[in-house]
Image (cartoon, grey):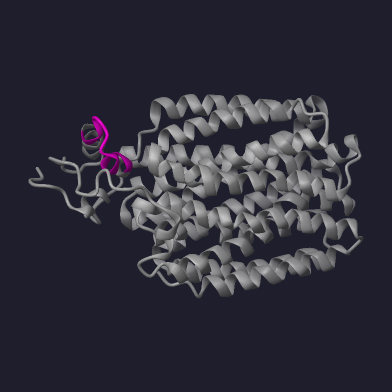
Amino acid sequence: MNTGVPSHTDIELPDSASWTPLSISVVSLCFLLNMLDGADMLIISFIAPVLADQWSISPESLGMIFSASLAGMATGCLIIAPQGDRIGRKPLIIGALLVLAVAMIGSGFCSSVTQLVIARFLVGCAVGTVGVTMTTMASEFAPPSHSSFAAGVVQAGWPVGAIITAFVAASLIESLGWDTLLISLGWVSIGLAVMMLFWLPESMQFLLRSGKNNSLERANALRVRLGLTVLDALPASAGEKHASVPELFQDGRKSVSILLWTAVSLGYFVLYFAISWIPKLAVDAGLALDQAIYAGATYNLGAAIGTALVAWLSIRLHLPRVVATFFLLAAVALLVYGNLRFPVVVTLAMAGCVGLFVQGAFNGFWPMAASLYPSRIRSTGVGWALGVGRIGAVLGPIVGGVLIGAGVSTEMIFSFYALPAVLAALTVISIRR
């Protein structure tokens, strides 16, 4: 048993920590949360062809609908998610899931672009909050040597959720309608909120720092389940002031934060163009609606593989180099997909390659951001990196809609989006921990 007052390092898991049923359970729950996030965010791209036809929506207006949820995600990352360092990770996740449920169910009853933009903004707020908070939770409960791997595995839940949603949408959208699909996802959000209430523990790091009643007892109960010795007292840092944004630029973190924010913005710009517009552009290119949705599904299948591959490589190689390499390959995949014409099967396979490299590269940002900041400011650091980056996420679909509305060729559009992928690679490789 520990004696004396624990040091700062007692808050972090020791390097010798290994996987336990609790750590596996937390990472698995976070994986489920990210599956839901992927389904809620990408369902709009799968129903976009039907929605555009029924409501006679222009590409510019459709781009605004796509970007509304991304603006909401920025709000969730920058303003709401950092509250996890203050009120705790668990209540923030549950609250965000309930907001998500209301917004998704409300989306199904929208009858105008304005209403849908508002609903999608709220969806984005909740998804952005959950995304940052669950990444922090996964990295905190995983063994330190596998924290990047755990954060990467959790990010694979996003494309897996999108794949399932794509196949459901392709099968049922014509019989049930797009509104029923949105409402159904709202009820799934409520179900997951109940799961988190009973099965998701609070962050041990948060408990030890909060200094609130019973926090030491609750933290020690988690330490026992993680196979660690219990503590006799709270760490000296308990009750200290909460993390602030200026701390992201202190202790040698200034250049790291600026470069990370720049790279994430560029990555988001490419990512959300691809996931928003690939199904609609596939329809415009002559594919049937179900084939276009399957193009979105194969994109996300590639994204799941790419995310898992980056997570696996992060254990063995320098993560920024892995991410940079994937971004360079993403630029090549975008050029090939946009400029060459293939049979349907090959087109679907190429969409998978775009997903593998674009989203595989981008999802490397989550474990990278989590590893660049100490746990006390981790939610704030990850939240601001992914939040500021949403500027690129908002602009990506909007610029795509403007280019499409202006009659720019598909070849030129994909060539245009290959450039920021290259710039993201160059920025990432400049990051030093």
Residue 192, given in percent of the width and then of the height, sits at: 51, 28
Q: Is residue 380 above or below residue 200?
A: below
- Look at the image and tell me whether residue 340 can be seen: no
Q: Residue at x 60, y 32 (%)?
A: 100
- Residue 83 at x, y = what percent? 45, 42
On the picture, is 268 further left or further right than 323?
right
Q: Is residue 226 left or right of residue 2?
A: right
The x and y percentages for residue 392 are: 66, 59
Viewer-side residue, 380 vs 164 = 380
**In the visual, does 402 lie left or right of 305?**
right
Verify whether residue 295 appears in magenta: no
- The stretch of residues the image draws in magenta is 206-216
Q: Is residue 167 left or right of residue 59?
A: left
User: Going 32% across and 38% down the picture, which residue do you hit?
Assistant: 21
- Name the one closer to the observer, 310 or 230: 230
Residue found at x 64% / y 36%: 122
- Residue 13 lies, with reference to residue 251, above or below; the image says above
The kind of secondary structure the magenta stretch mainly shows is helix
The answer to whether residue 118 is seen in the rendering is yes
Quarter of the image where the N terminus is located: top left
Q: Position of residue 128 (x, y in %)?
A: 56, 44
Say if 152 sits above or below 92 in the image. Answer: below
